Amino acid sequence: MTTILSDEDLLSAYAWNTHRAKHFFCSRCGVYTFHRKRAAPDHFGINVFCLENFDIGSFPIRATDGVGMSVAAPDALPQWPEPREPT
């Protein structure tokens, strides 16, 4: 569950293609805050630099390769909406 603690009215949402993924930005400064994932809509990606007192060194870092990423989640739950395969 995601809870916005303040200034929710200042968020702007951006969605494209299937509109399942939603990317949220501060409407004042434009910083990316978080997003709801397309292949796993009950998961969120969070810009940890927006969190107070977050120690980035205490978490493992995983590099991502955008070219090699798939929109299909291999561990997709049945209740998650499609697509199941890349389009």
Image (cartoon, rainbow, N blue to C red):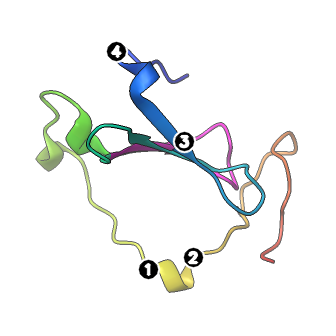
Q: Amino acid at mark 3?
A: Ala
How far across and down, in percent of the image, does residue 14 sit?
56, 49
User: Which segment is the magenta one?
Assistant: 32-45
What amino acid type should be assigned to the residue bearing mark 4? Answer: Ser
In 3D space, how far apart are the residues under numbered discs 3 and 2 (Cα atoms)?
Answer: 23 Å
Q: Earlier in the sequence, mark 1 or mark 3?
A: 3
Residue 41 magenta-drawn? yes
- In the shown orientation, is residue 40 left or right of residue 18? left
In the rendered structure, which disc, 2 or 4, sits on the residue that comes first in sequence? 4
Crowdedness near tag 3: few (<14), some (14–19) or many (≥20) residues, C-alpha within 10 Å: some
Q: CA distance from mark 3 to mark 4?
A: 16 Å
Query: Depth check: 19 or 63 in front?
Result: 19
Check disc 4: other Cα within 10 Å, few if <14, some if 14-19, many if 20+. Answer: few
User: Residue at coordinates 12% horizontally, 28% vertically from top-left?
Assistant: 53
- Quadrant where the image shows the C terminus: bottom right
- Which residue in the structure is indicated by mark 4? 6
Question: Which of 24 and 28 lies nearest the eye of the viewer?
Answer: 28
- Asked whether disc 1 touches disc 2, contact meaning CB atoms under 8 Å apart, the reply is yes
Q: Secondary structure at mark 2?
A: loop
The residue at the point 58 percent across, 41 percent down is 43
Image position of 43 (left or right of 25): right
The vertical placement of 4 against 68, above or below, is: above
* Residue 12 belongs to magenta span: no
Q: Are marks 3 and 4 in contact (CB under 8 Å)?
A: no
Mark number for residue 69? Answer: 2
C-alpha distance separating marks 2 and 4: 33 Å
Residue 31 appears left or right of 75: left
The amino acid type, in three-letter code, at marker 1 is Asp
